Amino acid sequence: MLAGLGGRACAAGAGSLVCTASPGVRVFSLANTIQSNMVIQQGRPFKLWGHGPAGMQIEIRADWMRSSRKATCDAGNDWMAAIEVPMAERGKYVSHTITLISSLDTLVLSDILIGEVWLCSGQSNMDMTIKPFLPWLKGALNFEKEIAEANYPAIRLFDVRTDFKAMPEDDCQGRWKVCSPETAGDFSATAYFYARELWDRLQVPIGLVVSSVGGSSCQAWTSRETLESDSLLFYKYLYPYDTSVRSKAKLDSVVTFEKVVRPTLFYNAMIYPLRNLSIRGCIWYQGEANKDDKGMYTRLCAAMIRNWRVLFGHEDLPFYYVQVAPYTWEKNDPSAWDYATLREAQGAIRDIVKHTGMAVIMDVSEPDDIHPRNKQAVGLRLAKIALAQTYGKKNISCLGPRFEKMQVEGMVVKVSFRPGTTGAGLTTSDGAPPRNFYICGSDHVFYSAQAQIVDKQVWVTSDKVKEPVAVRYAFTNYPVTNFGNREGLPAEPFRSDAW
C-alpha cells in the first residue's frame, strides 16, 4: 500500500516506489527483498536499504517503535538504516506496518510478521516444489493432501529468481508469499516441511528465503574472493574458467549446464544481494553436482560456509545440511562405493566447521530417482537439528547412530556408536536384522555380513571372514537402509578403514 503526497499518484511494486506524475523527479527506492508480507528476524536489528537522490532524507516508522529513525542518501545515491526488532510472542501473530517517508513520497509496508528467518539453498532437491514439475520432479509424497492442508499464514516464503552474474549484484528479484493452499504448491518442499515443524514447536512466524537452482555446484554459490584465497580451490575451480573462453561468454538468463556449475555466478546474483538481511541460519541441500569432487568437497563447502558467515556478519551462523541420498548413477553395481565417499566428505564438514549439522536420509530414498519424494522426513530431520542445536530444545533426538569404534573378538566385529546418537536404543524399521554391513580380512575384500543388535552395539560376522580387520556400513552407492535408533533416525554410513 502506498499513499501519494502532494497530489502525485504513486504505487509500490515489490518493495520499490514508482510515481506516475512529475516526470523527471527522482524518488527513493527500497531493496526488493524488503516487501509487504515478509517475516523479519526477531531480536536482531532489521536493515532497510535502497537508493535515492543524494541528500534526500528518509524517515522510517515501525509500529512497534516509540520514535522514528532517519536515513540520508549519500553521494553515491545509497541509503541504509537499521531499526531494532523485539522478540516475537509465542502464539501471537501480530501483523505490523513499516512506513517510509521522504519529502516527496510515502511507502507503506504492511502485514509484516516478526519471527524466525532461514536461508534455504542448494540444487534441485532444495528447489523441488511440493507440487510436481513433470517429467523431472514428481512432487512431494501425498502432495495433493499436503497442499490442501497448507493453511499456515504465519509461514512466508521469498523465492529468489534464478540469475547469473559475473560480479556481485546489489539486488535480486522475487516476491514474499503467504503460505496457503493457493500458494504452497510452489514452495520448496524441503523448506516448507522444515518451516512447518519449526512453527509447530516454536509457535512464532517462520520466514523462508529460498535461493536454489537445479544442477548447481557448491563453487557456484561461493565468492571469488573465497576461491582465490585457497590455492587448492583456486586451481581446481576458478583457474580453469578464468583461462577459458567460457569466462568471456556473455551471461544471460538462459539456464545451461556450463552456467549452473561455473564458480561464483549464483553467489553473485542470488546470495550477495541478501547480505543485509538478518537471518537465523541456513539449510543446504546440495552435493549431487559435486559427486566427482569427494576429495575436495569438504574443503570447498567449509569455505563456502565461512564465506556466508562473513557476508551475513555472523561467525556462528548455524548451517544444517542434507547428506546426499542413495542413487544408482546408472551403475547397476551394488558393490560400487564411489558415491559413498562424497557422503563421507559431507559428514567431515562437521568436524572442521562448528555450528553445523547433517541430516541423513539413507532410509527414505529411491535409488532410481535422484529426487526422493519423502521431503517430509528431510524437512523434519533438519528441523530436529535446529530445534536441538539452535533453539536449545530439550529431549529432542536429532542424530542417528554415528560410528565410534570397532572391536574384534574372534570372528565377531563389535561396533559401538557415539554417545548421544543411539537415542532410546538401536532398532530396525522393519523388524529384520540390520542390512548393509560388510567386513573384510587382511586381503581387503569386503563380504556382505550378518548383523545383530546387542544392547548398544551391533555385532557383525561373515563365514567368509575368519579374522576381520575392518567393517563398513551402507558404504555403497545406493543402499536403502533399515538400521537406526528408536526415534526413527537412521544410522550414518561409515567405514572403519581409510583405503
Image: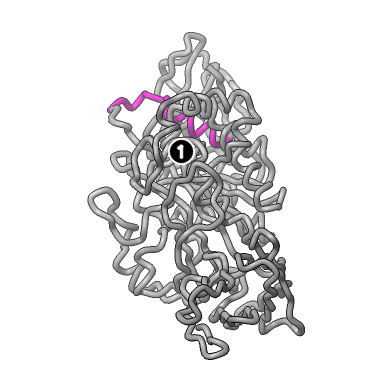
Residue 417 visible: no
Query: What's drawn in magenta, residue-wise?
Result: 332-347
Which of the two residues, 76 or 385, is positioned nearer the viewer here?
76
Residue furthest to the top in view is: 443
Secondary element under disc 1, as helix, strand or loop, is loop
Q: Look at the magenta stretch and give its main secondary structure.
A: helix
Q: Amino acid at mark 1?
A: Ser
Q: Name the residue: 59% across, 71% down.
A: 28
Q: Position of residue 42 (x, y in %)?
A: 67, 70
Residue furthest to the bottom in view is: 7
Residue furthest to the left in view is: 135
Q: Position of residue 37 (x, y in %)?
A: 51, 75
Quadrant hosting residue 62:
bottom right
* Number of numbered discs visible in the structure rendering: 1
Magenta region includes residue 470: no
Q: Left or right: where does residue 215 sit relative to residue 56?
A: left
Q: In the picture shown, does residue 134 fall above or below 278?
A: above
Quadrant hosting residue 182:
bottom left
Which of the two residues, 465 or 294, is positioned nearer the viewer here?
294
Which of the two residues, 156 or 97, is positioned nearer the viewer here?
97
Q: In the picture shown, does residue 479 fall above or below 383?
A: above
Quadrant hosting residue 397:
bottom right
Which of the two residues, 280 or 45, is positioned nearer the viewer here?
45
Q: Name the residue: 62% across, 59% down.
A: 387
| Badge 1: residue crowd in 10 Å (few <14, some 14–19, many ≥20) | many
Q: Position of residue 348 (x, y in %)?
A: 59, 33
Q: In the picture shown, does residue 222 fall above or below 375?
A: above
Residue 158 visible: yes
State the residue position of label 1.
Answer: 217
Q: Position of residue 24 (x, y in %)?
A: 51, 73
